[in-house]
């Protein structure tokens, strides 16, 4: 199906484990973003990417790694999960058509670190 | 630093009543502003956006927003709320580079029958 999809939708992992959240979009949008959503903090940008092989840090990048070898995929890896990384993670994509371009969001991944 | 403020954390309205959600931005002579809605368990969906022209913009689901430069505001309105409008609403402003957005903390809307 066309759009932006995240997998898994729900994940429980243990402290210290590595976990990867997947994001795939079918529009060939240039920009992709990873956010985390926490009560009282709204949406915070973790990493973003302007194109394949171009990534940059957002507000809260510590403990996360991203890669973008293909335009359509933007996986987010937690190298060694901590309880503070329990959150809902959203991937988004956007065309490179100027400042007024909207972002399209996936349905989110709810990650629990125990 | 740029910021977007949504003064109301939670609002409850009765079905059929009018609604206004407040948003204040802090930067930009001509800001690019957005309202998104997040239904429970879902991702965010764009309701409407403003970046130039008419200061009253129409969006999906019967929503509209008015840009007021003098008040640095971009308030979201709906004349008659439906129970299905219960959701989290986010105001956002273009950060000025790399398509990044600055987000408000959101307003949670509850609708009483």
Image (cartoon, coloured by chain):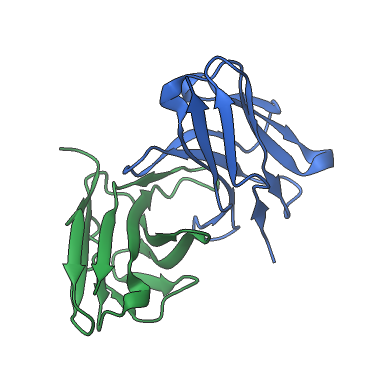
- In this view, the residue in front, B20 or A70, is B20
**In what quadrant of the picture does the N terminus of chain B appear?**
bottom right
In this view, the residue farthest toward the right is: B70
Residue A68 visible, this orientation: no
The residue under the point 19% across, 79% down is A18
Residue at image x 60%, y 17%? B17
Compared with residue B11, is residue A75 higher up or lower down, i.e. above or below? Answer: below
Q: Is residue B64 visible?
A: yes
Q: Is residue B83 left or right of residue B25?
A: left
Which percent across, then down, holds residue B14?
A: 56, 21
The percent position of residue A95, horizontal first and vertical second, equals 39, 47
Identify the chain drawn in blue: B
Residue B34, given in percent of the width and then of the height, sits at 56, 41
Badge count: 0
x%, y% of residue A45? 45, 64
Near-viewer residue (B81 or A55): B81
């Amino acid at each position: 199906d066309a759009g932006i999809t995240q997998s898994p939708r729900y994940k429980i992992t243990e402290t210290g484990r590595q976990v990867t959240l997947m994001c795939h979009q079918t529009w060939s949008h240039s920009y992709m973003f990873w956010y985390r959503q926490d009560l009282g903090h709204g949406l915070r940008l973790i990493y973003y990417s302007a194109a394949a092989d171009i990534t940059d840090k957002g507000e809260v990048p510590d403990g996360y790694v991203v890669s973008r070898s293909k335009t359509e995929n933007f996986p987010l890896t937690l190298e060694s999960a901590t309880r503070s990384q329990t959150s809902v993670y959203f991937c988004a994509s956007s065309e490179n058509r100027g400042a007024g371009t909207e972002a399209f969001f996936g349905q989110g991944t709810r990650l629990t670190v125990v | 630093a740029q910021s977007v403020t949504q003064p109301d954390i939670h609002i409850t309205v009765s079905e059929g009543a009018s609604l206004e959600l407040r948003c204040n931005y802090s930067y930009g002579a001509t800001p690019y502003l957005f309202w998104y809605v997040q239904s429970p368990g879902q991702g965010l969906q764009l309701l409407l956006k403003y970046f130039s022209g008419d200061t009253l913009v129409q969006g999906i689901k019967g929503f509209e927003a008015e840009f007021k430069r003098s008040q640095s505001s971009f308030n979201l309105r709906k004349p008659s709320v439906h129970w299905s409008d219960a959701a989290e609403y986010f105001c956002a402003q273009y950060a000025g580079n790399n398509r990044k957005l600055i987000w408000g903390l959101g307003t949670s809307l509850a609708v009483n029958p």
